[in-house]
Amino acid sequence: MSIRLKLSFLIAAAGLVTALIFSASVLFEMLEQPIRVMDAELKTIAYESVVTLDQAGAASLKDSRRYWIKIYKAGVYEPLYVSHIARHINLPEENKRKALAYAYVPDEVSYVEHNSDGLTAFRIRRMVIEQEHSTGTYEDDGDGDDEGYEDNKTSYVVYAAISAERIKGEIVDLIVVVILGLLLSVIVLTVISYIIAGYILQPVRAMNLRTRNITEKNLSLRIPIKENCADSDEFNTLAITLNGVFDRLENAFNRQKRLIADASHELKTPLSIMRLITDDVTIAGNITPEDASRLSNQVLRMERLVRDILNLSGLELDRAVVSERVDLKSVLEPLTEDYTLLASGRNIQLTMELKGSLYVMGDYDKLFRAFSNILDNAVKYSDKGGEIKISAERRDGRVEIRVFNTGEGIPAAALGKVFEQFYRVEQSRASRYGGSGLGLAIVKRIIELHGGTVSIESCAGESVTFSVNLPAE
Ligand code: ADP
């Protein structure tokens, strides 16, 4: 069942429950009303009959043929007066003050509103009325005794009844009207709720339509959102969240696409060189030591490239790193040892200064790879006889590692780009050292996975400083 239908039914059900409670209370009050009117009518006729009977005798009582009346003198068994219909209809004379009684209405009194199929309902009241100089009404408490009488007063016990069939019919009519009204309101409510639900769910339909159109060829398409905060609702928030998801998907998709395009481009050069060498070898019939060395260099370059591509695409898929306690000293010290050897070969002086506790949470191997890439660059791009300084310290709950190297540096315009994949400041300078162009992209991804940041400063023509900032453990 669609949400629109579900919403309509739920609203209609809630409306029905409210209407039921309301109509039940109104109905209850409306049903009471005619009974109260009947009771008042019976009380009046009883009072008037007793007054006439007391003053002028039973013969002067006018029989309206509408009321069932029996009047007794208190304590006397025989009634003083029995109305016309009371002679034909047998109603129980109980001590109850007010009651509903049922009896068959014979044909002789068929003018009384009656139920032709069975028993007819009568409202019957028992009243004790005193007559003296002034007339007073005494409402019997229903316990049957005649307490409160005084000897100089004449007390009459009156049973007065009236057919309740008309009222019964009215009650049935009323219930039917209420039920029909309820049914009608449920139908109207369902239709209105259906229209309202359609209006409320309109943004969902629009979102659904737009989302369906977003494909790999159409990844930049977004769900329209309301910019005005006052118009914003839950659906707008959902649209903003979905747009955020699409942004991330588009970025990841584009990064992968670029990686494939760039990687193919990067592989083209070594492959062309290798093809030229193998062509030469085929023509010459043998391979010179020079060609063998060039061939081996290109194979090494391709190997490095493929390894870095695999590393980077693996890191792209990682959401988080293995989190263990890593002492950055145990990362930086062995690296410094290795690179000191390499640096001394080019007469570069390498120094290291580590201060305080350098514990972070993360993946030892990945951190090792990141700092190895930075140091590798520092050695590669330092001038002969230059200087490399590694320093690390803990400050404000973070660990900051700085790697400084002298050399040609990086021009200001290129600083923002060196972390992009396959970006090289100078193609010739980088390929001289056989770099893949992915080293710093890998560094950035690893540091980000550790919740850290990496930045770069450079005095063009003089030096470069890499700063890595990681949350301390
Ligand atoms: P590569 O494999 O070419 O070294 P990287 O991603 O590691 O690729 O570096 C990108 C570019 O940034 C390099 O080609 C180089 O031009 C520049 N670069 C990186 N580190 C340094 C450094 N320490 N000194 C000077 N230039 C650097």
Image (cartoon, rainbow, N blue to C red):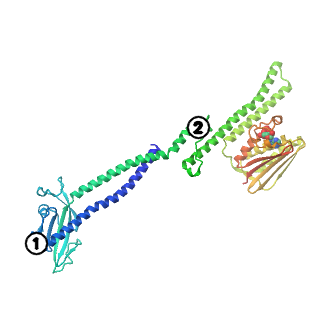
Mark 1 = which residue?
57
Coordinates of residue 258 in the picture (x, y in percent): 70, 35
Mark 1 packing: few (<14 Cα in 10 Å), some, or many (20+)?
A: some
User: Of 392 and 185, which appears nearest the observer?
Assistant: 185
Residue 183 in the image: above or below residue 131: above
Left-right relation of 362 to 175: right
x 79%, y 30%: residue: 298
Mark 2 = which residue?
214
The answer to whether residue 376 of the structure is visible from this angle is no
Mark 2 packing: few (<14 Cα in 10 Å), some, or many (20+)?
A: some
Coordinates of residue 427 in the picture (x, y in percent): 81, 35
Coordinates of residue 391 in the picture (x, y in percent): 82, 51
Residue 374 in the image: above or below residue 171: above
Callout 2 amino acid: Ile
Callout 1 amino acid: Gly
x 73%, y 44%: residue: 444
Of tags 1 and 2, the one toward the viewer is 1
Q: State the separation of the CA atoms marked 1 and 2.
A: 101 Å
Left-right relation of 34 to 360: left
Residue 311 in the image: above or below residue 299: below
Residue 216 sits in which quadrant?
Answer: top right
- Check residue 188 in the rendering and tell me which mark sits there, or answer none: none
Figure quadrant of the C terminus: bottom right
In which quadrant of this rendering is ligand 1 seen? top right
Left-right relation of 110 to 403: left
Circle 2 SS class: loop
